[in-house]
Image (cartoon, grey):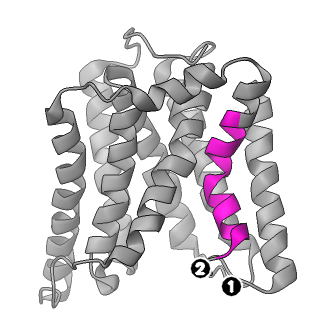
Amino acid sequence: MTLAWAGLTFLLTALGALWLHLTGQGPRDLSPAVILIAVSPSLAAFAVAACTGRLRALARQALDWRHHWGWYVLVLLAPIAIALTIDAVFALRHGAAPAQWLLLPGLAVLGPLLTGPLGEEFGWRGFGGPLLERRYSWLTASVIIGLLWTTWHLWPIFNAQGGESAVDVVQSLVRLVSTAVIYAWLYRRTGLPVVLVAHFGHNLSVELMPAEVIGSDLGALTLAAIYLVLAVTLVTVTGRRDRRSVPVPA
């Protein structure tokens, strides 16, 4: 099932990328192809779950919001604290603070902010991660998910308008593998809703940061380094062989 889900995710992504190529569009254009790519991990998870009798169990995960409110506050505020830290690093490096430390995004970004968590997390954490944990430790499974997540996230490289650099590849690899470990840890202790909010919180924090900060190599690499430190800290504190049960959609 894991291979079927991963294969379908990348097939849908490839179809979307081919669509963009044939129409001359880019990854930043709002189009059905970009939306298909954005939701491919979750869409593939629901398709495979439907074929294997696990659809109800997968969908039911989104209804369990009965976790302590502190978790939701933590995963919403922590990314904002990270954003302010990156602003401070940028100010120290350049000798001047950015014109605005945090921006106020418009309502137009609400759609993209929600598409990321809903379009991805049912696949990465709600379905793929638990399946891998049947064979591997939670840490190994999360690293595998992180590598898949990184490969999937770098699809704009194959688009003429992608503009991905070597720094983009490095920071994406470090950040997404680290984030996969963090989100797996959250998922094991709470459930999918907290991870959905965490993903939303991260996306929101990126929108809050000035473009000259998060769009710079310094900003992107600092963000990746912070997530790496957080992931290593979690693994060090909880241990690689954490035996906590996982809400597997079986």
Is there any visible trace of residue 215 in the rendered image?
yes
Position of 90 compared to 243: left or right? left
Q: Is residue 84 left or right of residue 150?
A: left
* Residue bounds of the magenta highlight: 31-46
Residue drawn at (50%, 24%), measured in percent from left and top? 60
Mark 2 crowd level (few <14, some 14–19, many ≥20, 10 Å Cα): few
Residue at 29% across / 45% down in the picture? 229
Pointers 2 and 1 in contact (C-beta within 8 Å): yes
**Mark 1 or mark 2, which is nearer the start of the sequence?**
2
Q: Above or below — where is 99 with respect to 217? A: below
Residue closest to the eye, 14 or 68: 68
Point out residue 125 in the picture as x, y percentages from the top left corner.
51, 34
Image quarter where the C terminus lies is top right
Residue 66, quarter of the rendered image: top left
Looking at the rendered image, the quarter that the N terminus falls into is top right
Q: How many marks?
A: 2
Can you tell which quarter of the image residue 45 is in?
A: top right
Q: Amino acid at mark 1?
A: Gln
Q: Please, what is the three-letter code of the amino acid marked with disc 2?
A: Arg
Q: Within the image, what quadrant is residue 63 found in?
A: top left
Q: Name the residue tied to disc 2.
A: 28
Q: Main secondary structure of the magenta part?
A: helix
Q: Is residue 42 left or right of residue 227?
A: right
Q: Residue at x 22, y 68 (%)?
A: 86
Q: Residues within 10 Å of mark 1 (few under 14, many from 20)?
A: some
**Residue matched to label 1:** 161
Judge by depth and name the residue closer to the eye, 237 or 76: 76
Does residue 174 appear anywhere in the picture? no
Q: Could you say whether the residue bearing mark 2 is in a helix, strand or loop?
A: loop
SS at mark 1?
A: loop
Residue 11, percent across and down?
Answer: 82, 51
Image location of residue 175, percent across then percent down: 43, 53
